[in-house]
Amino acid sequence: MERDLSEKHPPEKQLSNNSDSSDNEENATNITTNLNANHHDHPETETCDQLVSQSPKAGVKVEESDNTSHEIEEVHHEEKENDEKIGDTSPPEIHYTLETVSQDIDQLITTLSATPKDAKETIVEEEKDEKVPMEIPVFVEKFLDLVEEKVAKHELTEGKGKWGQNPEEDSSFLEAVNRISKLTSSLDGLRSDPNHAALISRIGGIQQRAMACLEDEFRFTLEDIKHNDQDPNTDAKGKQHEADRCVLPESESAETDNFLGYSDDAVSKLNRIAKEMIGGGFESECCHVYMMIRGQAFDECFAEIGFEKISIDEVQKMQWEALEREIPLWIKAVREYASIYFVKELKLAEAIFSNYSSISSSLFSNLTRSVLIQLLNFAEAVAMTKRSAEKLFKFLDVYETLRDSLPAMGALFSEEYENELKTESTTARCRIGEAAICMFCDLENSIKSDTGKTPVPGGAVHPLTRYTMNYLKYAGEYIATLEQVFREHSKIERADSTSRPRYESESQNFNNDNDEENQSPFSNQLVRVMDLLDSNLEAKSKLYKDIALSCIFMMNNGRYIVQKIKGSTEIRQMMGDPWCRRKSSELRNYHKNYQRETWSKLLGCLGHEGLQVNGKVIKPVLKERFKSFNVLFDEIHKAQSSWVVSDEQLQSELRVSITAVVIPAYRSFMGRFSQYLTPGRQTEKYIKYQAEDLETYIDELFDGNSASGARKRP
């Protein structure tokens, strides 16, 4: 008896129908099943019908024989074993690692990124036309477990500088954080689905913890950079080498250090961390840490320079001596920041945030803005302090710093911020310039107010002359800046110069040869100062009762003025050659007046008139002439030995001119009339000096020695 086994096991055609049914079911499955099948090559579960259809006994007719029952038992035994195998449909357990599951995550992220947002929320079952919730693959949970384990490991080493010891582990952690961030973004459409709320919340929590680790490492790397090159010979107290502190680079180090002491590895690590934090939506946390740490670095550099942050009110209350010490430190800070530190700070920001140019530009601008505001506030506070002539040159130092250093920084900023910086720095510079104008013009008032009635002993150079000329000589070192200041603030200068109406006509008359219209405002101001000084000195010369001493006083001061002018090329060019020629002519006139007032009277004693009557020398008259000469010369010597001529050249010129006038006249008089005196006692009584003696005494004039007197012949 034959039995067709196909009654139990359908033929191939029936299997084909079952296969079509299976395809329809597969179309109803979600994206996750396909991902698992594709990435793990897991063996698909075969149906019982398929296994049977593939059996070598399928479709075979068996004849009844003595062995028929035995064969049937074998078939049933095989069927039983197959049924047991088919009944166990669970796939074998998979051992996940972060590396293997990351591939699945990458594929899932790619698939989700290419899937429209609405399709992520539901999947349409074609036949039933129903929407079913999207299922999250199992390996996502496995991935989260592994990442969470890695985050926990990093949390244990938080802030202990473990990064960098195992570069592969650091890269693995950053890659895991990157996938967490991408996964969070890809599943953003499921936030409103209550079925996935727990999973989304877990992913967000892990991301928060991971970003906290990155933030701590970002902060630690920025802070710890000053220890990277620490001298191994650092003492037990932890005193750092000079190069380890946050100092401004100088000379060669300034050229080779592109990142303010940060190594290339440190910058690379900071760049990767910043990229992950910003890409993961933690831009504000990353930027906050950077601003805080780099802001502290700026403060440290202020301290290294020695410049303290001083408010406007504090500057106003400072004594000038203290403020005068602060200004050079401020100048150093501005120049160092402008030429070195800001340039390198921009390079650092651009390197760390290389993927986000707008962020690096914004961070750099915000950091430098706080520093620049502090520096500009100091300049404006200085401009508001009480003005006086002696402060001028410190103000000009501040002016030059604002003029030369700040504009150079414009190229570092965006156009908008560059314009803002230019406006603020120009405002501060103008206020300093206005103050400088007023100070220089105040020199006129200082000269006018010097109305002392006590003459300078010995006709020496007056303190006002020394002060004014040294002031102007020093101003010559700032000649270009002063010209610029006066040119840019000429209206302020004209309104502020209280002495101009009085002396303007004199200056105009004097400068006709120089074509005043072509003169700079500062040159005109300088001429007014000199005219005012001349007038003041002329008034002071009248305080001397002795006209000769008055002439010495004017010669002393005039020579001092000329020498100072000649000693400053800049001031001499400002004053012009006509002024110098006029001043030299005045000195020659004072010299002539001196000679006339002093030595002409002495020479009158050596005249021939009245000594002879009818060809005979009248001895009493001759004796009186010698006697008068001796007395007058003694008086002149005694007085003028105490007079002061400090300029050696002028002193020599005076002595030579006196000798040239007196000695030849005395020799001639002695040669002609000494013979009329009786040799011996009479000669010694009336002829007190020989020509050589007079030369010696003349060389003692103008030494400023009040105890000096004519010595008697031995």
Image (cartoon, grey):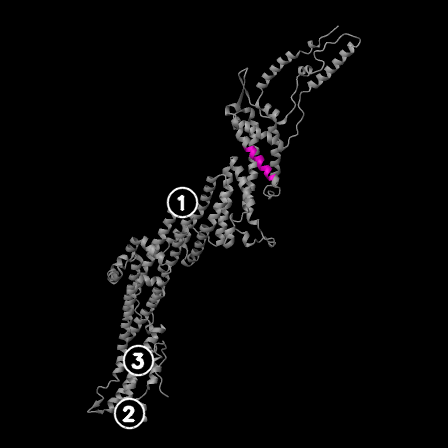
Q: Residue at x 36, y 66 (%)?
A: 567
Residue of label 1: 418
**Residue 541 or 552: which is nearer the viewer?**
552
Q: Is residue 53 left or right of residue 463?
A: right
Residue of label 2: 675
Relative to 210, does residue 83 appear above or below in the rendering? Answer: above
User: Where the C terminus falls, by quadrant?
Assistant: bottom left
Distance from label 1 to label 2 (Cα)? 96 Å
Mark 1 or mark 2: which comes first in sequence? 1
The residue range painted magenta reads 169-181
Q: Classify mark 2: helix, strand or loop.
A: helix
Residue 49 seen by the camera: yes
Q: Decide: few, some or many residues near mark 1? Use Cα within 10 Å; few <14, some 14-19, many ≥20.
A: some
Residue 9 picture location, percent across and down: 68, 12
Residue 546 picture location, percent across and down: 28, 75
Residue 362 quadrant: top left
Q: Main secondary structure of the magenta part?
A: helix
Q: Which labelled disc corresponds to residue 660? A: 3
For badge 2, the amino acid type reads Gln
Residue 445 seen by the camera: no
For badge 1, the amino acid type reads Glu
**Residue 401 or 580: which is nearer the viewer?**
580
Q: Is residue 36 magenta?
A: no
Distance from label 3 to label 2 (Cα)? 24 Å
